[in-house]
Amino acid sequence: MFAVMVILFLVVPFLAVGQVHGRYDGWCDSLQNATSPDLVQFLNAVVPDEKNARCVTWAIHQLGNEHHEPAIPALVKLLDFRIPRTPVEEIFHGLSEETFPAEAALELIGKKVLPEVLRAIEADSTSAIARENALSVWMQIYRESDEQPKGVSLLKQEENRVSDSAIKQKLRWAVQKALTYCNPPEKAACQEAAATGVPDKGDVL
Amino acid sequence: MIAGTHADNEGILVGLDAGTYNVRKATCTYYCITCNGWWTALLTGTPFTIPKGSGTTLQLQDQWNTGATYSLSGNYASNNTAVATIGATNGTVNGIAPGSPNFTGTGNDFVYISNYCAVDPICNSRSSPQGSGGGTVVSATISQRTSSTVSSDDAALSSYQNAVGTTNLGNIIENGNVRGCGIGLETIGSVAPSNYTGSVIMHRTIVNQGLYVNSTDAGGETPANTDDTSPSNFRDDNPQSGGSAGKVYDLDGPGLHPSAVDGKTYRYRTNFSAYATLSDGTLISPSPGFFFYVRLSCQLTGPGYVFINDVPGDNQIGIGTTNTTWNLQ
């Protein structure tokens, strides 16, 4: 037994690259052969619960990897869907393991999700968690292009533009929360953008 | 369609006026024709990005005035054979070292002449189309920081800070959105050439793992060789962001998050492999990877989370591998 363990211990590391299993491999055999439109249809129809949570996770992940733009509305609606975790996984996990898979999927799709994400930030029907996650996606997408201050300034412009006081309030929250996503080198520029909303070189939504 | 015997565009006699027909004039004057031939040349397959040690193939092509494109036999050359060589006749590139080499391919083909006039014009002039293009041979060296604070040019810094409540690396009591004992780590990919502007993604794989409550296997270990790559908000995939001049990052904090004051010690032993790829998944760091381990033991007590040091050598991160038993024996 010991010998087997030693062999495994020596051999397994050398398999690490090239034979890596996906994190969600085997999570949903029933959708394995589904097309992207099928997966969108599935997400549009599903009410996530304990039984289907792994399939929902798998479908979200798949659509993100495929950068499937027609999935954007469905993914935004699932921004507060949590990856199911066992009690053991709740205790033993890395810091950066995904909690909300739709966040990652939308970030993978990129800038085209921004209008729908902004609508989610503004909508009354959006849950508090989904709104926080929508803001996270918004700032993450601007971070990827090194434009965090632009992300803040566009939220501020939107706050200035809308007349509905309830939406204005949500955007005011979003602007302040967005500042916490700015990295130290960009903090000052972010704060200025939050204060003034001055467009940066013709930024438009 | 009327076409001449010499070329597509050739002067022809289309009519005769009434009168005396001058045979000499009709047969001895200059004709003007268009000679079809190449007017631009290019090297297909450029620009490219390949990992050091791998290759690609370039092909000389020219485009004719007719719109047709032809692949040509040619002679290929690299301007920097220390970075990449190219097969003289087959265009096969081998990436030797990081850098940005340029290549030329030279062939031979008919020349395009829009208006060629002669008594008996024949299109047989040839010249040497030359296509050129460059590429990048890229590689990444992986290292890790496990002390001090997250690098200021690491664009994932704020995500880390929001999660754990500090920018400190190494053993931390996590006090942000995540609560527990963790070991913060920053895995760094140093990309060469350092001015490379494409995305480079740091990946992480769980090679194997042991999870315990006191000395009992907790179950639920992640299967061997499972992808554990961080979501993008914990990565900085842009080698130029924040002035980092060729560095990409991955931040993580493997940890334990007991939910109750139950007197139990939770133990985490995991071997990881880290590697870097281009955005299309092409591996650019040494295979099989950069191996490191994390082992820690933690308990939630009345005052809060504490590291438990009852096992020698516990609560540390290191390069290489660890035994994954509860007592590290």
Image (cartoon, rainbow, N blue to C red):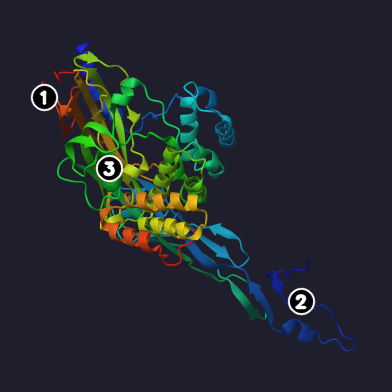
Seen as rendered, the residue at the extreme top is A1
Circle 1: residue type: Asn
Q: CA distance from mark 3 to mark 1?
A: 26 Å
Q: Label 3 is placed on what type of residue? A: Tyr
- Residue B24 as seen in the image, left or right of residue B252: right
Report how far apart the C-alphas of labels 2 and 3 lie in the structure: 79 Å
Q: Tell me if I can see residue B224 in this picture.
A: no
Mark 2 or 3, closer to the camera? 3
- Chain ID for label 3? B
Q: Circle 2 is placed at which residue position?
A: B12
What secondary structure is marked by label 2? loop
Image: B186 above or below B306: below
Which badge, 2 or 3, comes first in the chain's sequence? 2
> Which quadrant: the N terminus of chain A?
top left
For the point 69% across and 80% down, the residue is B31
In the rendered image, residue B137, in percent from the top left (x then y), is placed at: 33, 52
Residue highlighted by disc 3 = B160
Q: Is residue B193 left or right of residue A167?
A: left
Can the viewer see residue B159?
yes
Q: Residue at x 42, y 54 (%)?
A: B89
Q: Is residue B18 left or right of residue A75?
A: right
